């Protein structure tokens, strides 16, 4: 993740909000509790290099919850039937967030450190939407 679009200074080593939670509502973005503290970061003095580099911090981790059940049945001597149910992000619907907005702009301080998109919304493990897949297989 790019820490900021321009060089910045870390005014405090604790620029990630301790014991962070997104708050009661994820939408609109202005209702979120910011993941990064705006006041802990600032622009460097003119003609100096900032102290906060690229890829300095990361967003919250991913909790990929997967459950599966399978049962095999013998049908005669030659056939076997397997029934399988898989659940991703099931039974707990928890959004998996991408990294927070890290563009440091004094004119839009309320957007800094907030989340605007989800991780892999429909594609793979760690997706945000819960779903269950049922499958059957016949072996002979």
Image (cartoon, helix red, strand yellow):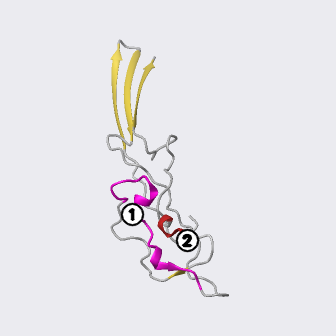
Residue 139's spot in the image, x, y percent? 45, 20
Q: Quadrant of residue 102?
A: bottom right
Chain-order first, disc 2 or disc 1: 1
Residue contact at pointers 2 and 1, CB within 8 angstroms = no
Label 1, residues with CA under 10 Å away: few <14, some 14-19, many ≥20? many
Residue 95's spot in the image, x, y percent? 41, 49
Q: What secondary structure is marked by label 2? A: helix
- For the residues labelled 2 and 1, the Cα–Cα distance comes to 18 Å
- For this rendering, which residue is in front, 87 or 82? 87
Q: Residue at x 58, y 67 (%)?
A: 2
Q: Quadrant of residue 75?
A: top left
Q: Residue at x 37, y 24 (%)?
A: 83
Lateral position of residue 134 relative to residue 54, left or right = left
Outermost residue on the front side: it is 107
**Numbered tag placed on residue 33 in the rendering:** 1
Classified by dominant secondary structure, the portion drawn in magenta counts as loop
Residue 70's spot in the image, x, y percent? 34, 30
**Numbered tag placed on residue 54 in the rendering:** none
Lateral position of residue 59 relative to residue 49, left or right = left
User: Which marked residue is nearer to the observer: mark 2 or mark 1?
Assistant: 2
Question: Relative to 94, does residue 108 appear above or below in the rendering?
Answer: below
- For this rendering, which residue is in front, 130 or 35? 35
Which quarter shows the N terminus? bottom right
The range drawn in magenta is 22-44
Question: Relative to 128, does residue 57 appear above or below in the rendering?
Answer: below
Q: Residue at x 38, y 23 (%)?
A: 82
Q: What secondary structure is marked by label 1? A: loop
Residue that numbered label 2 is attached to:
107
Residue 43 included in the magenta stretch of the image: yes
């Amino acid at each position: 993740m790019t820490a900021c679009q321009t060089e910045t200074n870390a005014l405090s080593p604790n620029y990630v909000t301790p014991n962070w939670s997104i708050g009661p509502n994820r939408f609109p973005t202005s209702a979120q509790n910011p993941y990064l503290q705006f006041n802990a970061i600032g622009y460097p003095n003119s003609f100096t290099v900032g102290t906060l580099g690229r890829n300095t911090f990361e967003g919250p981790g991913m909790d990929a919850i997967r459950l599966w059940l399978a049962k095999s049945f013998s049908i005669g001597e030659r056939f076997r039937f397997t029934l399988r149910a898989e659940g991703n992000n099931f039974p707990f619907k928890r959004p998996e967030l991408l990294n927070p907005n890290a563009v440091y702009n004094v004119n839009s301080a309320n957007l800094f450190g907030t989340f605007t998109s989800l991780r892999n919304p429909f594609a793979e493990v760690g997706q945000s939407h819960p779903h269950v897949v049922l499958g059957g297989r016949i072996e002979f």
